[in-house]
Image (spheres, helix red, strand yellow):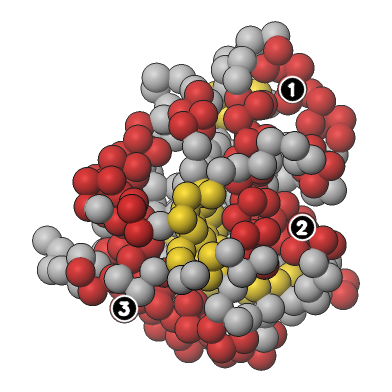
Amino acid sequence: MTVTTGLVTDERYLLHDPGTWHPERPDRLKAIIKQLKFSGLWNELTIIPPWEEGVLPWVEAVHDPAYIRRFEQACQKKQSIFMVPDCGICDRSYEIALLAVGGVLAGAEAIMQGEVANAFCAVRPPGHHAEYNRAMGFCFFNNVAIAAVYLLKQHGLERVAIVDWDVHHGNGTQHLFEADPRVFYLSLHEDPDYCYPGTGRRKEKGRGPGEGYTLNLPLPPRSGDEDYLEALEKEGLPRLYDFAPQFVLISAGFDAHRLDPLAHQNLTRRGYTAMGRMLLKLAQDTARGRLMSVLEGGYNLEVLADCVEDHLRLLSGRELKRAEAAEA
């Protein structure tokens, strides 16, 4: 049997409705799925359904149980906001946030079992801003962090790398692992002086036994492909290779693209594909190819759909068909 690339998704992810005004809207996922089906790539992927059972204990391994209960109760009461104004919710949001976690767990397990070579998780709501006991930045449960804990505890891995190229710093992910030397967290993001959430400065390097296992590479506004690729190649990759991860996780936000409305960077599709190629090679060199990307930001629907297709073509070895096309 040929081992393929996995795609984790489920129509129920559309049921999380943070409000018609909200940038993190169901149309993001609709645009991705429509593009993958139109391009024909959908038929080349292994579709992985999210887990529905046994998910909550893994959420509790990362988040405060009291916080989890508050989130559940807020949805049961049909509140429209949870904790902060940018975290819009509906009565199904808790259920769907659990399903997003179930998605990343299913993807990680499929890779570990050799059922797929690698995977992309088209899940929502996103996760990298979610703190131990606080919702932030459209995020409730930290999907990628929970996947990392699952790999460490369930499969006994000793070194997991999380590379976060969302334009916004993944404050939640950093804080959850800043004292843990088993997880190397690398973030490329817009300078926190200019961009939400205001964390992710170079001086933030971890603490205690985790000192030196956090690497923040903030980039000034209007940084483009060359700036990102230089930072990753010259500073990020040497540290990642020294760490030699056994599994590579990507917090894959596509909101540093030059046409995205929520930030001020100038990445293109080519830049994202080049970063993805570097990290895929890292996974092949140190982690038996084990790599999983988890959707974070990206709010221009056309750009988001294009970038996800490009990324999946890269993971599946088919990127030359579209990803290297000239971009206006």
Q: Earlier in the sequence, mark 3 or mark 1?
A: 1
Residue at label 1?
Answer: 72
Q: Is residue 138 left or right of residue 277?
A: right
Q: Quarter-wise, where is residue 183 in the image?
A: bottom right
Q: Quarter-wise, where is residue 41 in the image?
A: bottom left
Q: Is residue 142 left or right of residue 164?
A: right
Instruction: Give the alpha-carbon distance from disc 3 to disc 2, as whole Å.
Output: 35 Å
Q: Position of residue 123 (x, y in %)?
A: 52, 43
Instruction: Give the alpha-carbon distance from disc 3 to disc 1, as whole Å.
Output: 44 Å
Asked if residue 73 can be seen in this view, the reply is yes
Q: Please state which amino acid type lies under the numbered disc 3.
A: Glu
Instruction: Give the alpha-carbon distance from disc 1 to disc 2, as whole Å.
Output: 22 Å
Which disc number belongs to residue 226? 3
Residue at label 2?
Answer: 150
Q: Which residue shows up at 74% across the image and 22% down it?
A: 72
Instruction: Give the label, 1 or 2, closer to the camera.
Output: 2
Q: Please state which amino acid type lies under the numbered disc 1.
A: Glu
Whether label 3 touches label 2, CB < 8 Å: no
Q: Please state which amino acid type lies under the numbered disc 2.
A: Tyr
Q: Residue furthest top?
A: 77
Instruction: Give the label, 3 or 1, closer to the camera.
Output: 1
Q: Position of residue 312 (x, y in %)?
A: 38, 62
Vertically, is 4 above or below 288? above
The quadrant of the rendering that contains the C terminus is: bottom left
Q: Earlier in the sequence, mark 1 or mark 2?
A: 1
What crowding class fits label 3: few (fewer than 14 Cα within 10 Å), some (14-19), or many (20 or more)? few
Mark 1: secondary structure = helix
Instruction: Give the label, 3 or 2, closer to the camera.
Output: 2
Q: Which residue shows up at 25% across the image and 53% down it?
A: 40
